[in-house]
Image (spheres, rainbow, N blue to C red):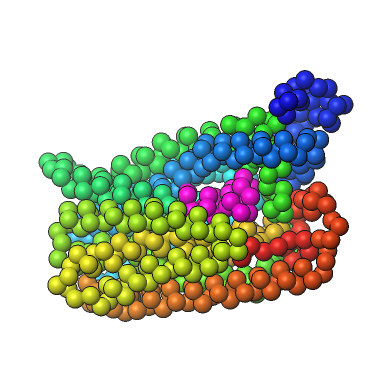
Amino acid sequence: MDAEKAVAASSPSDHGVGTTTDFEKRGFLSRLKGQRIDLDELGKQYYQQSLQYDEEQLKRDAIKVRRKLDFLVLPLMATTYMLSFLDKQTLNYSNAYGLQADTHMKGNDYAWVSSAAYFGWLTGAYPWQILLQRFPVGRLIGVMLFFWGSVCMLQATVTNFSGFVAVRFFLGLLEAVVSPAFVLLTSMLWTREEQSLRSSYWLSVDGVASIIGALLAYGVGHIHGLSVAPWKLIYLIVGAMTFAWGVVIFLYLPDGPHNVKALSEYERVVAVWRISQNQTGLKHNVIVPSQIKEAMLDPKSWLLYLMAVCIGMLNGGTTNFLSAIISGFGYSPLKTSLLQTPVGAFELVMVILFGYLSEIRNFLGITIMLSCLPGLVGLIGILTIPFTHRFALVVMCWFQGVVGSPVILSWTLPGVNTAGHTKRTTVLGVYFIAFCSGNIIGPHLFLASEKPRYPTAIKSLVGAYSAVIGLQMMYTAYCWMENRAKARTGLLDGVSTTEVALEGFDDVTDKQNKHFRYRI
């Protein structure tokens, strides 16, 4: 008999839990209404309820639950992330329609405007982590989108360089919550083996955003006779879309498996059972100082921070200067906008492809290294291919869209390999501070006097890709040695999966939990 029907047909004494109404009487749902609760404790209770059901039935129902999460929750995350990337890219697209001339930018002013959003992100990176640990993820993102869309539209009112820097700063400050929030939410809804692919899905829509943005810019370029400049219209359209989407997210984005609207109460139990072997729990509101110390002394965390700086340089440089590079090859503004469309297609396809590759057992680290190669080849091509082969140079620019793959797969590492909620908050906070620092550095490598090839920038980014590959190699080796050291203790011998799973809800770190194994 189906497990849900069995629950409905039996009394609470038969299974330790009755119908959905019985759940509410026991307080599992009522505690969620208007109160901040310890999700780890709630997760442990849900997991203990799952033990009342047949394991084979749980496995079958887990597939149904995963499909619901994939088809109902993942699109919410993906659309939000697409809009966040589109908001960032508006600067790149508006640059082709007289932005710098209208705002009186000179020299490297545009590079500073590009960096301003990341100064905002840098400022908000750690504070947002604290808020994410203490408040519901879905509500926080929903409220943020209202402000974010409004600030995006405000860019259309700016008339000078200093004003643009200020608005972009606040845009980055608001956006700083999205990436860590989604890393956290992904770790609560999907298993460790599933997380890299699901993260690749919600980041791959950057490719869709690139296509939409390029086509939007191309379409706006054909509008004549309006009192609003084309570059301003781009900000107004994208900002309004973001504001409207905030309503959907506020109402429907869950805070964890316990309040996914698309799941029944029994399916929420299954959802918690599914992720119990992650050994990272759900969420704990209390800040534990000892975990902050462990995060700062953990060697593998520092390898992540160094990688974050390099990946940030790549992201900040390539996403903000593709338009300038392509136009430097002699293309008109309209043609430049249109030629950027394939960048999105490259990103969409390659990020998902590498996401699938990362699901192979013990292949996550290798996938990150492989995903660096297309961008590396493209940069070398930009630097060396003669100007007589303009289209080949443009194709090398398209390869830069693949940077999204090492970006998202490296973001996955703190989520799957860090346990202890305060430790994970700290690692993610410092990681995104390092990532933002790289994004600030990246645009300033592009010296105005070196257009269109920008040799200083291209050589530096080649070095950054090489460093990511080397650092990832060291990170994978370190995690492999740690796993071997834990395996030699023999602590898993004779230990039930139930004991291992319950320990994951006790807010212990990956080093304290001797049963924890790193994903490599």
- In this rendering, the answer to whether 189 lies above or below 370 is above
- In this rendering, the answer to whether 424 lies above or below 468 is above
Q: Residue at x 86, y 57 (%)?
A: 494
Q: Residue at x 55, y 67 (%)?
A: 365
Residue in front for this viewpoint, 81 or 410: 410
Left or right placement of residue 471 versus residue 242 in this view: right
Q: Quadrant of residue 392?
A: bottom left
The quadrant of the rendering that contains the C terminus is bottom right
Left or right placement of residue 411 versus residue 379 in this view: right
Left or right placement of residue 220 versus residue 348 in this view: left
Q: Quadrant of residue 50?
A: top right
Can you give x and y, in whole percent of width and height, for residue 163 in the image? 33, 57
Q: Residue at x 71, y 58 (%)?
A: 420
Left or right placement of residue 253 versus residue 166 in this view: right
Can you give x and y, in whole percent of width and height, for residue 439 in the image? 42, 66
Number of numbered labels in the structure image: 0
Where does the magenta region start and end? 181-202
Secondary structure of the magenta portion, mostly?
Answer: helix
Residue 119 seen from this side: no
Magenta residue check for 199: yes
